[in-house]
Amino acid sequence: MLGVIWTALEITGYALALVAFMLVCALGVVLTALQLPGTWLIVLATGLVAWWRWDQQTIGWYALAAVLGLAILGEVLEFIAGALGARTAGASKRAAAIAIVGGVIGAIAGTPLIPIPIVGTLVGAAIGAGLGSVLGDKWAGRQWGEALKGGQGAAIGKLGGSVAKLTVAVLMWFVAVGAAVLP
């Protein structure tokens, strides 16, 4: 009788741990939408569950590598998109660099200023990248028309990069949870 109770407790504990893992990974997706390092929370949680249950091979090397590779891809997409958007629109290198900083500042400022969850952060990041690009181009001595065109490209690029990284975070959630649920 004691063996049956222990087995039931093990199953219950594993189920609760699985739900907690799913929620932590979902939190990672939300943090990514808020322009915080949520993809790395998903990588950390996946790594911890893999380590905890390594003898059962709950999460294997392929899933760990996929989650890590997706996190790196998300960072690269987000980082390059704003700067590439500015450069494609004709902004200077200085404008592209300041667009990255402006995107971070805009995300932080946009979160409380636009009180719609996630939307404020994304819009703030795009506006910040655009304003950063305009500031960089004006600092480089460009005319207003050129600076505004580069700013528009930076804003569109940052928004596209943020959406791409959020898409990657959702994909990471599916890979991590899928690996844990379907070992």
Image (spheres, helix red, strand yellow):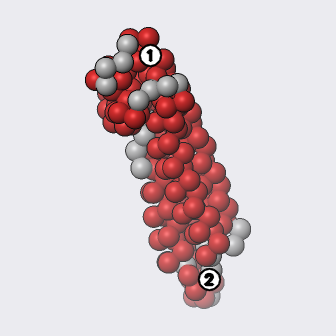
Give the labeled residue for mark 1.
Answer: 146
The reply to whether residue 101 is visible in this rendering is yes
Label 1 environment density (alpha carbons within 10 Å; few <14, some 14–19, many ≥20)? some
In which quadrant is the N terminus drawn?
bottom right
* Element type where label 1 sits in the image: helix
> What's the residue at 62%, 83% (across, down)?
56
Residue 110's spot in the image, x, y percent?
37, 25
Q: Is residue 90 left or right of residue 124?
A: right
Q: Which mark is residue 180?
A: none
Residue 161's spot in the image, x, y percent?
53, 38
- Check the image and name the residue furthest to the left: 139
Residue 92's spot in the image, x, y percent?
41, 29
Establish if 62 lies above or below 146: below
Residue in the foreground of this view, choosing between 91 and 111 = 91
Establish if 55 lies above or below 158: below
> What's the residue at 48%, 17% (across, down)?
149
Q: How many marks?
A: 2
Q: Residue 117 appears in which quarter of the rendering?
A: top left
